[in-house]
């Protein structure tokens, strides 16, 4: 019920633009009345998104704080309806910066050790055919918080970004592309693959709170 | 493309459910996180409050500086009583500071010295003849 109510927020910074077959499902977010209200509303989601991406709560908080400061100082005088997309552009940029820093640091740290695993290995190639898909069971698992957290966290970064920005944040394809710094076609591909991988992981999870450890 | 359309229709409900679950998770009570986010928010909004009063100050001081410079450039003497096109004369330089260092042909002392030197030069020649 709470989820249904949350989905009922309309008139978003997405603006209801529908330029692909899946736009209509992305519920939009209301235009904020003040910067304080916007940061209060977006803060928790931003923190969760950053934590999914960097897997470190403190680093995620730092990223969110930097993004908030940057939004306020650089774009505080813009139209409130633009704050959401702008905030996401800044946030995703900070997340990518963090990843680049971490990648560089890990390269130096593991200079002489075995070559690292490919981080952006395409799990789409490894998704097996779905033997049996019970829609009711699938949706039941999609309601389970722990399972969903694990499944989202297991997604590769770009798919995770595309899914969270489109489905959760309610941005349209163009805004998501701007936030991710890629083309709209790439956004659609990442989003499509993210949903397919998540569906598969949800179907493979044994119980609603079952452990799903395909992450590493 | 057909796959994608088919997929989008099939997954529409799934995405909605996932969104609802994520929304619920983000609303779970977490006092420590709420406190940290409130601090981050306050810091960000503090930057905004610091930024706004700074702008008029910068503008005002910049304009005052520009006006002051313009005053000096347009009115060199600082008094506005001269007519347009009038070039103000420089005050005379005191003679004691420059004339002593720069002797001219009109300098009587120098002329006397030159006469005396000419006389001294002519004397031995007259003496030899005598």
Image: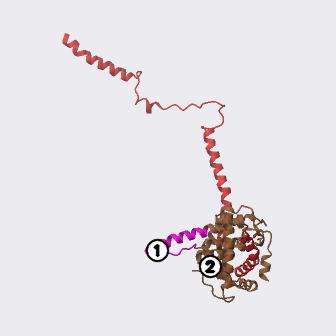
Judging from the image, mark 1 belongs to the subunit labelled: A
Q: Is residue A111 magenta?
A: yes
Q: Is B65 located above or below residue B94 in the figure?
A: below
> In the rendered structure, are the residues bearing label 2 and label 1 in contact, judged by CB atoms less than 8 Å apart?
no
Horizontal side of A21 relative to A107 (left or right) equals: right
Residue at figure coordinates x 30%, y 19% from the top left: B116
Chain painted in brown in the figure: A
| Quarter occupied by residue A37 | bottom right
In the image, residue A138 lies at what x, y percent?
A: 72, 84
Colour setup of the view: by chain
Q: Quadrant of the N terminus of chain A?
A: bottom right
Q: x, y (%) of residue A126?
A: 61, 78
Mark 2 / mark 1, whichever is N-terminal: 1
Task: Compare residues B29 and A178 and report the one nearer the observer.
Answer: A178
Determine which residue is flagged by label 1. Answer: A109
Q: Secondary structure at mark 1?
A: helix
Point out the stretch of residues depicted in magenta.
A94-120
Q: Callout 1: few (<14), some (14-19), or many (20+) C-alpha neighbours within 10 Å? A: few
Residue A154: assigned label: 2
The residue positioned 53% from the left and 72% from the top of the image is: A102
Residue A47 point in image, percent of width and height: 65, 75
- Chain ID, red in image: B
- Picture quarter containing residue A136? bottom right
The residue mark sitting in front, 2 or 1, is 2
Helix, strand or loop at mark 2:
helix
């Amino acid at each position: 019920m709470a989820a249904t109510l949350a989905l009922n927020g309309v008139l978003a910074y997405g603006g209801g633009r529908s330029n692909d077959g899946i736009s209509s499902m992305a519920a939009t977010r209301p235009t904020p009345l003040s910067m304080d209200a916007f940061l209060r509303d977006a803060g928790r989601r931003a923190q969760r998104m950053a934590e999914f991406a960097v897997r470190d709560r403190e680093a995620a908080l730092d990223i969110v704080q930097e993004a908030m400061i940057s939004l306020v100082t650089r774009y505080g005088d813009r139209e409130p309806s633009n704050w959401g997309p702008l905030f996401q552009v800044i946030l995703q940029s900070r997340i990518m910066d963090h990843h680049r820093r971490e990648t560089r640091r890990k390269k130096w740290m593991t200079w002489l050790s075995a070559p690292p695993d490919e981080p952006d290995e395409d799990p789409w190639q490894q998704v097996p055919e779905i033997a049996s898909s019970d829609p009711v069971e699938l949706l039941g698992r999609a309601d389970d918080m722990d399972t969903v957290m694990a499944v989202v966290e297991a997604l590769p970064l770009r798919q995770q970004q595309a899914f969270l920005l489109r489905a959760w944040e309610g941005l349209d394809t163009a805004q998501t592309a701007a936030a991710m710094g890629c083309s709209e076609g790439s956004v659609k591909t990442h989003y499509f693959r993210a949903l397919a991988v998540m569906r598969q992981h949800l179907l493979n999870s044994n119980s609603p709170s079952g452990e799903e450890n395909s992450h590493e | 493309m057909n796959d994608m359309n088919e997929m989008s229709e099939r997954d529409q409900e799934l995405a909605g459910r996932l969104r609802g679950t994520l929304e619920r998770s983000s609303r779970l009570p977490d006092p420590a996180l709420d406190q940290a986010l409130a601090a981050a928010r306050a810091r960000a909004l503090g930057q905004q409050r610091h930024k706004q009063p700074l702008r008029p100050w910068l503008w005002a001081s910049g304009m005052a500086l520009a006006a002051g410079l313009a005053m000096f450039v347009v009115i060199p003497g600082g008094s506005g009583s001269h007519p347009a096109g009038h070039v103000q004369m420089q005050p005379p330089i005191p003679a004691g500071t420059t004339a002593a260092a720069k002797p001219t042909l009109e300098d009587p002392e120098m002329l006397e010295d030159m006469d005396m030197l000419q006389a001294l030069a002519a004397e031995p020649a007259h003496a030899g003849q005598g």
